[in-house]
Image (cartoon, rainbow, N blue to C red):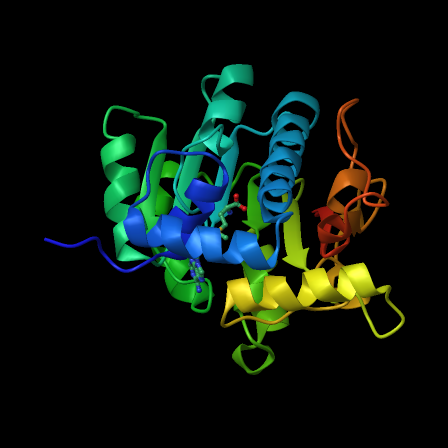
Amino acid sequence: MGSPPPNIARVYDYLLGGKDNYEADRTLGERIAIALPQVHLGVQQQRAVLRRVVDHLVREAGLRQLIDIGSGLPTAENVHQVAQRIAPDTQVVYVDNDPSVLAHARALLADDKRTVVTDGDLRHPAELLADPALRAHIDFDRPVGLLLCGILHYVLDDEDPYGIVRALVEALPSGSYVFVHHLTTAGPEVDADTAEAEAALRQGVGRGQFRTHEQVAAFLDSLDLLEPGVVTVPEWRPDADTPSPDDHPVLRLAAVGVGRKR
Ligand SMILES: C[S@@+](CC[C@H](N)C(=O)[O-])C[C@H]1O[C@@H](n2cnc3c(N)ncnc32)[C@H](O)[C@@H]1O
């Protein structure tokens, strides 16, 4: 039996230094890394900002329910590990539409009663919200943290990304939070290094749509935006060792923001 074809979640795991990947994933990961040597830093910092946001939502905002859509593999310090270390009673629902991610994630989480993995497609929010496993795990009368990390750029304009986010936000009770991480285009005025990094990243992502900072901010425009607003990954409440986007073009190619529903 050969290695299964590459899969974005396992390639991502490989780039993060994880062990849940196969030969084909490593080969594709290496190809991306040749075109864009900084890609490891990009995915590490994506995971790092996700950790900072989850820490804020659980520790500061006091949330005890998180829905992570497009979760990928729940390895390498993922959402449930960060959240449940702060508050062990935090319920986490991972949603993904990739069967191999689901199988792998279910096996990894078999003994975890507070974390479930469910099959859902962001492009079908009504079905996603009606999912019995999600409804059994999440109480929609209490605030929820909705995580859309590294997924909205896979939803093309003609698939109504803004309508999708609106439908999800409408379903959330007051006091809920939404986190968006989205790949961005550096724009026409950009320096040669960043333009090169963007071209390589687009190749690695495949089917997807990079948006401007303004277009990313528009996903959160019905919510109260937390400080510091919609910014690059390292600028969102950095830790002491967070690298600067000035030194690393790849870190200028994503925007993040967190909004709170009144
Ligand atoms: C790049 S990974 C992001 C992993 C994680 N959220 C993070 O940022 O660390 C993107 C994940 O989104 C999933 N995905 C892509 N399109 C999706 C869709 N329409 N519905 C649900 N999941 C989707 C992929 O299967 C993959 O696991």
Side of 85 relative to 253 (left or right): left
Nearer to us in this view, 9 or 140: 9
Question: Where does the image place residue 167, in percent across and percent down from the top left?
Answer: 56, 64
Q: Residue 51, how many percent across, how many down?
A: 61, 31
Along the viewing direction, whichever of 222 and 4 lies nearer the viewer: 4
Of all residues, the one furthest to the bottom in this rendering is: 158
Residue 52 placement (x, y as % from top left): 67, 30
Q: Can see residue 129?
A: no
Q: In this view, does 67 lie above or below 242?
A: below
Corner quadrant of residue 43: top right
The answer to which of 261 and 93 lies nearer the viewer is 93
The residue that appears at 46% across and 62% down in the rendered structure is: 122
In this image, 95 relative to 39: left or right?
A: left
The residue lying at 67 percent from left, 40 percent from top is 175
Horizontal and vertical percent position of residue 243 = 77, 34
Query: In the image, is residue 95 above or below residue 128?
Result: above
